[in-house]
Amino acid sequence: MALNYIWIAFFLLAFGVALVKLVCFGDTTVFPTIINSTFDSSKTAFEISLGLTGVLSLWLGIMKIGEKGGVIQLFARLLSPLFSKLFPDIPKGHPVTGSIFMNLAANMLGLDNAATPLGLKAMEGLQELNPKKDTASNPMIMFLVLNTSGLTLIPISIMVYRAQLGAAQPTDVFVPILLATFFSTLAGILAVSVYQRINLLNRTILLFLGGASLFIAGIIYFFHLLTRQQIDLYSTTFANVFLFLIIIGFIVAGVRKKVNVYDAFVEGAKEGFSTAVRIIPYLVAILVAIGVFRASGAMDFLIQGIATLVRGCGLDDQFVGALPTALMKPLSGSGARGLMVDAMTTYGADSFVGRLACIFQGSTDTTFYILAVYFGSVSVTRTRHAVPCGLIADFAGILAAIFIGYLFFN
């Protein structure tokens, strides 16, 4: 229901802004620009779905091997103590917890192409447990908020863009992104726990959060000791080795279980095509709405209004130049990426705005895209508190990014 109101608001606000620009300022190009954006966004949505088909087929095939080889069940047993607290409605040891872990691991390593099909596989498993097929279950919402909060350990793509745009130290945003995304994820977990009345004050969750904090502190310390070249080399190598180890591990597990690995892969890969087709309408809906909102100039008015408000409060408005990336990130990953690149190109890759835009890009994930694709893949239309919890995580990530950006780079 929340997505319904947001979707309508995009169009109504875009129409209102465009009408003002036409009547009051004589801008005769605004409505043609809006209409052109609908065609471009529809085409983009289809191209994204088409591009996902091969990746979905690959990873759903690999997941099927892991499922038949017992790997997913192994992860489920290992994570059962923690997941039984965060996902109390999932039966202990259920295979879907393994799928959830694989998705979160891929996200943390910045492996977006792998994370999406793994996430869709997890959603299918959660839907099997869902008593109301058109309504998001509590485990679905917790899972999606963990995705939208964007916990990232190694932001490879952002560091690559910074290197391409001439940053002296492309990896200097590594630690700030790690810190900002940790606070975003923590806020998301707390928000969902309040809505779902999950008790976080228990030994298992406290040990996990404490251990995660120590682990992140250890990573920060380790990378702090490395040179820029070493950080680039280690982070890229680790992510890709981890990804290939997953593939090899699943295949070896299938062989040990005497599974016909090839047939299992093909069986899972067939699901990739049907899943890619199912998400096309949902992608078209959300991307067209975002495109209209951008093309009308509503986003520009929003940014200018925020800058005026910040100056009126006597605060430094230097961060506002990077804010379009933060505001676009929940709506469109590619749009936010474009705004991040634009900020680095306009202000400089090593400027405060350029660096802050990179932190914004890495601190959260594309909330509405994830909601549309993941819920759309299992035909869930009633999202309950998924949107507000996801936006709380986004807001926490934005605030943390601003604070950390000033702390590190201003």
Image (cartoon, helix red, strand yellow):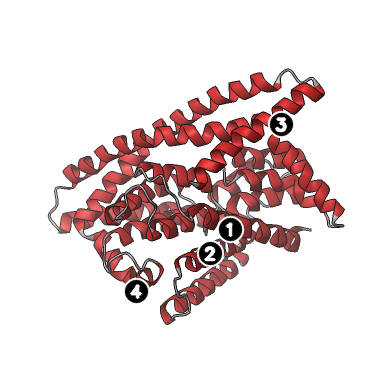
> Of the numbered discs in the image, which one, if any, rests on residue 17?
3
- Is the C-beta separation of discs 3 and 4 under 8 Å? no
Image quarter in which the C terminus is found: bottom right
Q: Which residue is mark 4?
A: 81
Judge whether residue 317 can be spotted in this image.
Answer: no
Mark 3: amino acid = Val
Mark 4: amino acid = Pro
What is the quadrant of residue 32 in the picture? top right
**Is 15 situated above or below 346?**
above
Residue 248 position, x and y percent, is 29, 53
Q: Residue at x 65, y 56 (%)?
A: 398
What is the quadrant of residue 175 in the picture? bottom right
Distance between mark 2 and mark 4 Cα atoms: 21 Å
On screen, residue 259 versus residue 220, left or right, reads left
On screen, residue 182 versus residue 201, left or right, reads right
Q: Which residue is mark 2?
A: 191
Depth check, front residue: 151 or 38 = 38
Distance between mark 4 and mark 1 Cα atoms: 26 Å
Q: Farthest residue in the left direction? A: 258
Does dot 4 land on a helix, a strand or a loop? helix
Q: Which residue is mark 1?
A: 392
- Is the C-beta separation of discs 2 and 1 under 8 Å? yes
Distance between mark 3 and mark 1 Cα atoms: 27 Å
Q: Residue at x 51, y 56 (%)?
A: 235
Distance between mark 2 and mark 1 Cα atoms: 7 Å
Distance between mark 3 and mark 4 Cα atoms: 51 Å
Tag nearer the camera, 4 or 1: 1
Residue 363 position, x and y percent, is 59, 55
Mark 2: amino acid = Ala
